[in-house]
Structure formats: C-alpha cells, structure tokens
Amino acid sequence: MTDGLNKVILMGNLGSDPELRYTGNGTPVLQLRMATNESFVDKNKEPKERTEWHNIVFWGQRAEALAKVLSKGDGVLIEGGLRTSSYEKDGIRRYRTEVIARDLRFTGRRGVAQALPGPDDDGEATQPGAEVPTTARLGKNGVRGRPPEVPALDELPY
C-alpha cells in the first residue's frame, strides 16, 4: 500500500493576533487566523476578489517562539497538512478543518511603505529594498529574525 500526501502551502496575512494556549499537560498550542486573497474576472468581465480564511495551528516550542513575534497583518507563508476533527454542539455534529503547520516564513507586512527597524536593532531604520534577507526561517531553537519589506522586482540589481 502506498502512502498519500497531505501537504498545504498558503501565503497570506494574519487576520488577528495569535492565541497561545496550553493543553492540560502543558504543551503549547498557537492558533492563527490567516486570510488568502484570490483575484479573478467574473463572467461579466469585472475584476473581483475573494478572501478565504484558514485556521492554522502550531504545537510545541515553535508555538511559544512564534507567539512572541507574530501579530495581526503579518504576511506569512505556511507549510503544513490538513486535519479535520468533529465535535457535537447543541446536538448537531460539526466539523473543523485546520492546517497543522510545520514551517513558517515571513513575506512582509501588507501595505507597509515606511522605514522598518534594521536587522541590528541599533535604532537605525532600514529602507524597504535594502540588502537584507527576504525570508526568515524558524529553527527548532527559536526565531532568527523578521526581515523588512521585500523589495519590488524592478528594484532588484539583476
């Protein structure tokens, strides 16, 4: 028998501040609400936009580390897998589908056009488009840092 593949990759913006909670045995759980937008042209040839909302969950030490650095409006790319659970409320069986996240990368804040704090935290500002990493990958021991706004493609030197 072959194994299946349960992989989800989402890129969007956090719709609210993350919620950090702990299970009964002390395991950290971080819950995020993430919005992804899709632009399309309808049958009347008018531009439309649709927003989908996703429930994202991080477990363990990563959950605690991310709770310290994530906030509403952050642009992120999340990789993980889907998990559906069910519960009963008022005698009705309900279902909830979540993304159990394994990896997160920052993509920049939506609509930010001002100077952002520099990577060396000396109070100096880094202008958008300056030469700094455009993604931050989280290691098992915590966060490596948040990058400033990603430069526009026409501002890249190559």
Image: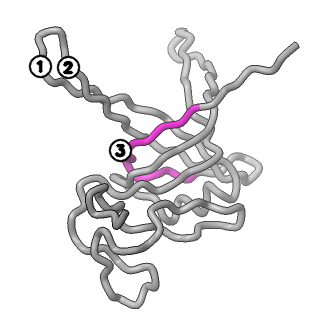
Q: Position of residue 74 (x, y in %)?
A: 38, 54
Q: Position of residue 33 (x, y in %)?
A: 43, 41
Q: Which residue is mark 3?
A: 15
Name the residue nearer the viewer: 89 or 74. 74
Give the quadrant of the N terminus. top right
Please tell me how crowded label 3 is: few (under 14), some (14-19), or many (20+) other residues with Cα within 10 Å: some
Q: Nearer the viewer, mark 3 or mark 1?
A: 1
Q: Earlier in the sequence, mark 1 or mark 2?
A: 2
Q: Quadrant of residue 71?
A: bottom left
- Amino acid, disc 2: Val
Q: Which residue does the image show at 65% across and 45% down from the upper left?
A: 102
Q: Which residue is mark 1?
A: 46
Please tell me how crowded label 2 is: few (under 14), some (14-19), or many (20+) other residues with Cα within 10 Å: few
Q: CB atoms at circles 1 and 2 under 8 Å apart?
A: yes
Whole-angstrom CA distance, mark 3 to mark 2, is: 25 Å
Q: Which residue is mark 2?
A: 41
Callout 3 secondary element? loop
Judge from the rendering whether residue 144 lies leftward or rightward of residue 52; answer left or right: right
Q: Nearer the viewer, mark 3 or mark 2?
A: 2
Name the residue nearer the viewer: 145 or 131. 131
Q: CB atoms at circles 3 and 1 under 8 Å apart?
A: no
On screen, residue 61 above or below 2: below
Callout 2 secondary element? strand
Whole-angstrom CA distance, mark 3 to mark 1, is: 26 Å
Q: Which residue does the image show at 69% across and 59% down from the upper left?
A: 61
On screen, residue 99 above or below 93: below
- Amino acid, disc 1: Glu
Q: Position of residue 79 (x, y in %)?
A: 58, 41
The magenta stretch is 8-20
Callout 1 secondary element? loop
| Colour scheme in use | one colour
